[in-house]
Image (tube, grey):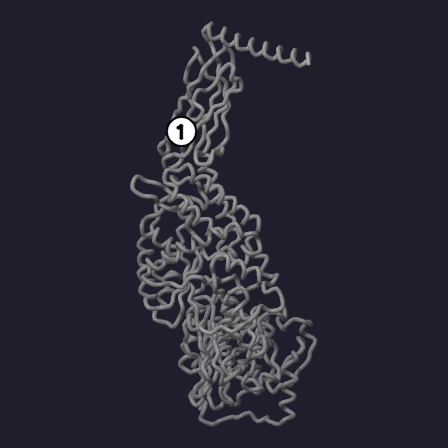
């Protein structure tokens, strides 16, 4: 029985078939060979394909463009006058009998009215796709070819004429036996729109493709031991700047975006809620925990990112949201595997290539502190020593730098690491732990799945349904095909999503794991289990870090600036009464300056690093000598006042003042070095005792020095001491001393001539 209904835009067309089975009629050897040949070829852009596979050539379509004039590189349906999008496909995995229900919408994207048409489905003529590369071939194929297989007979829906720009929804229900599936595997599924009658009847007006996974109940494949990482990460928000009060030290954030992310419905809150109770391994950045705890204790938000005046910062409002997020995270990770990345999730590739060796000690120290913070805050024993290079790319330099940071395990794309006993050729599933020279263990993750997860940015609402469906079906097909590669072998599958995983991608990933687990070709496994028996391996015979990723690296000049800031921070710590708190704040900011998250925001990276530099510059410059021009010295002994301005938010210690005379025979300082102590945000006047021997002007130079190592601090200050009313005795004493010096010189010269 067929039931149809057509109306205006938004109409749904439903087709329900009877129990009759339609198997594919062509099974001869000659047809199989023809399918193999045609699957490798594309229909010319100027050709229109009929529903029976015949091609009708015409001159209306320019070469390289579809009928609507759009470039051929666009989505498959854009080559045709009608765009086809799928919104749902149920069930996600075909098990046994039942019906396949498809819904979606079609849109007339051409400049002309499209007449009556019908919507149908096809299953790839080659049957189940045997290789991972075959899945990509299906996704890249654009026009309809014989490789798409014949239309499933009598399972079509009528589509009323479409005016220009009109959109209509549709639904198709096809009995599973009518699909003619040959058993377990991933199949190419094509949904197409063809002209129903008149001139050009049967011409394809639009199509879309996806993958259909089948796993009958009687199937017995060795399940893939699947490790799924669940990153809860974000970009750095807390700066080096702090605001000191009588009772506390309040950190300053560059913005208040974490308030929304931590709050109900926010990305970070939803990730925690979605991951709770799921078979995943949590991946955390200790810095995010530090920032959340700082928000709970009280914080400020800068007027503009990188501002150096904490007084201008406003009160942060996200304390309650951060507290709720921490409580939710603590409950979610209880009893689960947790990985604590190095503090700030440093960009290992940029550091290894751009001269980050001087930062090794800083990052190693920060990571040790970060892990303890995670353990205390969440009540877990997190796994440390795990590095995650950008894109999972690994070469010798990155591996060496990771070892320098104390990282013995590195997450690496399977495309760049090979094991000595690979069971399948490169490009197939090649996950699992590999021992490399030098003691590094590379945990390879699936490159094809990662590329799908990283490239997908589906919206959360109805508008993102087609992209979410396409991603779900592709991932199901990828994992099922991986299991079919070696159906009886016990193998690993490691799935790694983006660091800042979108909620829609997270939802799809959990659905895929649940469907594969329910069907039986996936079996959840932990991170420790994946590392249990590494095999000997090597890096591939090429530089594992592609040139295309170099553009997003942190520039060497910026890394050099971070190194200089580290040196200036050590200098600043020498003059502070509470150096530990300030040094910890600045060290954390320096670690954030080289975070991997900045690859997605180069402007933000530059702004953050400049903010740290400006803070240090302002802090160092806030301890200075107040300029003066001339002081009057009357009498033989006097004191000269020199004012030291302390603009820091804490007491000044660890510096001393020295004053040098350009004419010590006229005026000399009795105090060679005077210690300087000043309370926070006040000025202190230091009085230097001097002895005057002759009237007249004398140039004096005042300079601050650090007491720990005697290094100059800041710029010197030069002024004039005008000596007046020196007693005659002092003058005679000075003149007499001068005369004695002259006589001594003359006597020495005379003796030299005599000899």
Residue 285: image x %, image y %? Answer: 42, 58
In the picture of the structure, the residue carrying the numbered disc 1 is: 675
Work out whether 9 lies above or below 721: below
Q: How far across and how far down the image is residue 626, in percent?
A: 45, 26
Number of residue marks: 1
Instruction: Examine the rendering and report whether any part of residue 481 can be seen.
Output: yes
Residue at coordinates 42% horizontally, 51% vertically from top-left?
Answer: 237
SS for dot 1:
strand
Which one is nearer the viewer's eye here, 165 or 300? 300
Q: Position of residue 542 (x, y in %)?
A: 62, 66
> What residue is at 45 percent from the left and 81 percent from the top?
223
The quarter of the picture where the N terminus appears is bottom left
Location of residue 32 by image quarter? bottom right
Q: Residue furthest left?
A: 247
Q: Residues within 10 Å of mark 1 (few under 14, many from 20)?
A: some
Q: Residue furthest front?
A: 755
Q: Is residue 14 at least partly visible in the picture?
A: no
Which quadrant holds the C terminus? top right
**Residue sitting nearer the eye, 163 or 418:** 418
Residue 117 screen position, x and y as percent: 54, 81
Q: Is 270 placed left or right of 345 in the picture?
A: left
Find residue 216 and report its image quarter: bottom left
Q: Which residue is at 61% across, 61% downward? A: 547
């Amino acid at each position: 029985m067929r039931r149809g209904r057509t109306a205006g835009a938004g109409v749904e067309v439903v087709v329900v078939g009877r129990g009759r089975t339609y198997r594919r009629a062509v099974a001869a050897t000659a047809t199989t060979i023809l399918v193999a040949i045609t699957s490798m070829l594309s229909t010319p852009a100027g050709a229109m394909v009929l529903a029976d596979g015949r091609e009708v050539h015409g001159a209306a379509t320019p070469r390289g463009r579809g009928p609507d004039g759009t470039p051929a590189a666009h989505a498959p349906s854009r080559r045709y006058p009608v765009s086809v999008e799928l919104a749902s496909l149920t069930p996600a995995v075909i098990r046994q009998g039942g019906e396949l229900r498809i819904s979606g919408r079609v849109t007339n994207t051409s400049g002309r009215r499209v007449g009556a048409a019908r919507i149908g489905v096809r299953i790839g003529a080659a049957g189940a796709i045997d290789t991972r590369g075959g899945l990509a071939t299906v996704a890249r194929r654009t026009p309809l070819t014989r490789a798409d297989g014949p239309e499933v007979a009598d399972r079509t829906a009528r589509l009323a004429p479409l005016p220009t720009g009109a959109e209509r929804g549709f639904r198709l229900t096809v009995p599973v036996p009518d699909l003619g599936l040959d058993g377990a595997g991933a199949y190419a599924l094509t949904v197409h729109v063809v002209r129903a009658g008149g001139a050009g009847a049967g011409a394809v007006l639009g199509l879309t493709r996806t993958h259909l996974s089948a796993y009958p109940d009687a199937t017995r494949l060795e399940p893939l031991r699947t490790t799924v990482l669940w990153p809860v990460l974000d970009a750095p928000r807390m700066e080096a700047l702090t605001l000191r009060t009588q009772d506390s030290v309040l950190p300053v954030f560059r913005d208040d975006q974490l308030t929304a992310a931590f709050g109900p419905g926010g990305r970070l809150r939803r990730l925690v809620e979605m991951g709770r109770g799921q078979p995943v391994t949590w991946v955390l950045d200790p810095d995010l925990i530090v920032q959340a705890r700082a928000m709970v204790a009280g914080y400020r938000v800068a007027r503009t990112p990188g501002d150096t005046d904490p007084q201008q910062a406003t009160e942060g409002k996200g304390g309650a949201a951060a507290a709720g997020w921490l409580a939710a995270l603590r409950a979610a990770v209880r009893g689960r595997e947790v990985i604590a990345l190095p503090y700030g999730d440093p960009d290992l590739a940029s550091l290894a290539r751009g001269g980050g060796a001087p930062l090794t000690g800083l990052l190693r120290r920060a990571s040790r502190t970060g892990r303890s913070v995670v353990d205390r805050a969440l009540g877990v024993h997190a796994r440390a020593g795990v590095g995650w290079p950008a894109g999972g790319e690994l070469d010798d330099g990155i591996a060496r730098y990771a070892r320098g940071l104390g990282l013995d395990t590195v997450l690496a794309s399977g495309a760049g690491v090979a094991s000595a006993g690979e069971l399948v050729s490169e490009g197939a599933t090649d996950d699992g732990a590999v021992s490399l020279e030098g003691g590094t263990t590379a945990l390879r993750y699936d490159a094809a799945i990662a590329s799908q997860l990283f490239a997908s940015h589906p919206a959360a609402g109805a508008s993102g349904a087609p992209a979410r469906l396409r991603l779900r079906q592709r991932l199901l097909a990828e994992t099922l095909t991986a299991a079919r590669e070696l159906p009886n072998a016990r193998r690993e599958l490691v799935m790694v999503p983006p660091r800042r995983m979108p909620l829609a991608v997270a939802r799809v990933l959990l659905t895929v794991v649940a469907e594969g687990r329910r069907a039986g070709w996936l079996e959840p496994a932990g991170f420790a289990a994946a590392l249990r028996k590494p095999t000997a391996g090597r890096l591939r015979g090429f530089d594992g870090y592609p040139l295309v990723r170099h553009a997003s690296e942190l520039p060497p000049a910026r890394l050099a600036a971070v190194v200089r800031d580290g040196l200036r921070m050590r200098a600043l710590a020498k003059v502070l009464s509470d150096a530990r708190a300030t040094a910890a704040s600045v060290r954390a900011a320096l670690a954030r300056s080289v975070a991997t998250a900045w690859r997605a925001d180069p402007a933000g990276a530059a702004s953050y690093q400049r903010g740290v530099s400006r803070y240090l510059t302002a802090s160092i410059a806030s301890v200075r000598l107040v300029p003066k021009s001339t002081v009057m010295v009357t009498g033989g002994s006097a004191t000269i006042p020199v004012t030291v301005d302390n603009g820091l938010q804490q007491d000044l210690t660890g510096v001393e003042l020295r004053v040098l005379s350009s004419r010590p025979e006229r005026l000399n300082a009795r105090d060679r070095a005077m210690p300087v102590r000043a309370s926070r945000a006040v000025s202190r006047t230091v009085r230097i005792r001097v002895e005057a021997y002759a009237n007249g002007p004398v140039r004096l130079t005042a300079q601050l020095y650090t007491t720990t190592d005697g290094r100059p601090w800041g710029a010197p200050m030069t002024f004039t001491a005008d000596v007046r009313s020196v007693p005659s005795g002092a003058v005679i004493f000075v003149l007499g001393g001068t005369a004695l010096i002259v006589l001594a010189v003359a006597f020495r010269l005379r003796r030299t001539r005599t000899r």
